[in-house]
Image (spheres, helix red, strand yellow):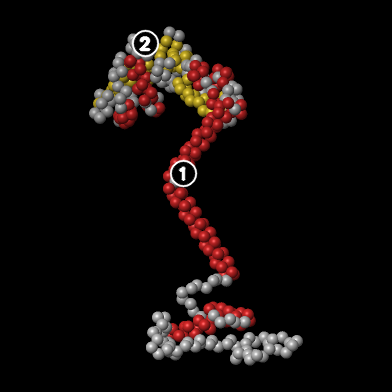
Amino acid sequence: MKRPNGFPPPPPPGQQAPASSPTPPKSVRPIRPAAKAGAAPQPNAEPESPASPKSASARSTSRDTAPKPASTAAKSATIAAKSRDTAPNHFASRAPSPSRTRSDEALARKNVRVAERKRRRYERSEARRFTERSRRRRLTWIISAAVLVGLVLVVVFTAYSPLFAVRSVDIEGTSRIDASQVQSALADQLGKPLALVDYGAIKNDLATFTLIQSYSTESQLPNTLVIRIVERQPVGAVASGTGFDLVDPAGVVVAHSDQRPDGFPTIDLAGGPVGSPGFLGATAVLAALPADLLAKVDSVSAATPDSVTLVLTGSGQKVVWGSVDNSALKAEVLDKLIGTQSPNDAVTYDVSSPDTPIVS
């Protein structure tokens, strides 16, 4: 049997065929019968020419469809795949490798996480910006409430804690009044918390001491109550049936003696009782005099508050003082006038109008 061209001879018995694939047979163009003379042309017949593109494509198609051995087909497929990978193709995308795909996915997930963190950070900043006023107002309310609660707790602890109960009462500012008597009068305040001391009861207890003009209280932690007393200061002596009474500007008797007390002028009531307007005017002038000038006054009298008259010690010089108004200026003018006169001369100083004093 005659073999077609392009196929190698078969191997001898017991040997394998060579690995190289045989050369594919050339495509054989079918021979068409010649047209008879006078016969009509076939409708689908077309003239063939060696340079016709159609004939070239037909030949390529016939070669592609020709049967090939298995090894030849695999080799052709490998060559075609390599040519597809190396040849530029602008119309179809190559499939990425698995490792590159995983790295791209990891990078994409990382970018998503970064964007998510930025978005959350931006949202938090915007939330803080829009809620800043409410947060500040809430913080103010919280601080105010905490301060109020703290004050309430301090007051309650101070008021009811036995650690701040009164253990001693200190009396200050007394000279004519016995301090132990005042402490005995205030003994009912011992044991009470400093915040619960009864100041009304203290006022009633101190009212029994006529020599107390005013007083003030102070709580000294942890358990001391301090009473500062201002005693009444006498300004003159008033003659009585049994002696002389030292009185203060309000007419309260500070002390009593059988003899006229030294260093105090006598007050002439001019027929009026203690506490009358004339008496109050005279004592007010005595209280306004400086100490050095008060020591030079022997007596004072006043029928009305505007007609106060002083008598100086020594030769009995008189001073028309008038009312208690401008007492400081009158005292200064009188002191200068006395320096211009002899203490033995019987003169009268009129300082009722301190701008125009008169010496007669």
Q: Position of residue 150 (x, y in %)?
A: 53, 34
Image position of 16 with respect to 133: above or below: below
| Residue at image point 46% right, 49% down | 128
Query: What residue appears at the point 39 percent right and 19 percent down from the top-left corner?
Result: 249
Q: Going from the N terminus, do you reach mark 2 or mark 1 first? A: 1
Residue 353 is situated, as x and y percent measured from the top left of the image, at 25, 26
**Where, quadrant-wise, is the C terminus in this rendering?**
top left
Farthest residue to the right: give it. 14
Residue at image coords 50%, 86%: 30
Whether label 2 touches label 1, CB < 8 Å: no
Badge 1 element: helix
Looking at the image, which is closer to me, 140 or 115? 115
User: Mark on residue 281?
Assistant: none
Instruction: Report the mark closest to the observer, 2 or 1.
Output: 1
Secondary structure, mark 2, is loop
Q: Which mark is residue 135?
A: 1
Residue 1, image x, y percentages: 65, 90
Please name whichever residue, 144 or 97, is drawn nearer the observer in this view of the structure. 97
User: Which residue is more in the foreground, 65 or 352?
Assistant: 65
One can see residue 235 in this view = yes
| Residue beneath the point at 52% across and 37% down | 146
Q: Residue 273 — which label?
A: 2
Instruction: Look at the image and tell me whether residue 75 can be seen.
Output: no
Q: Amino acid at mark 2?
A: Pro
Q: Is residue 182 above or below residue 44?
A: above
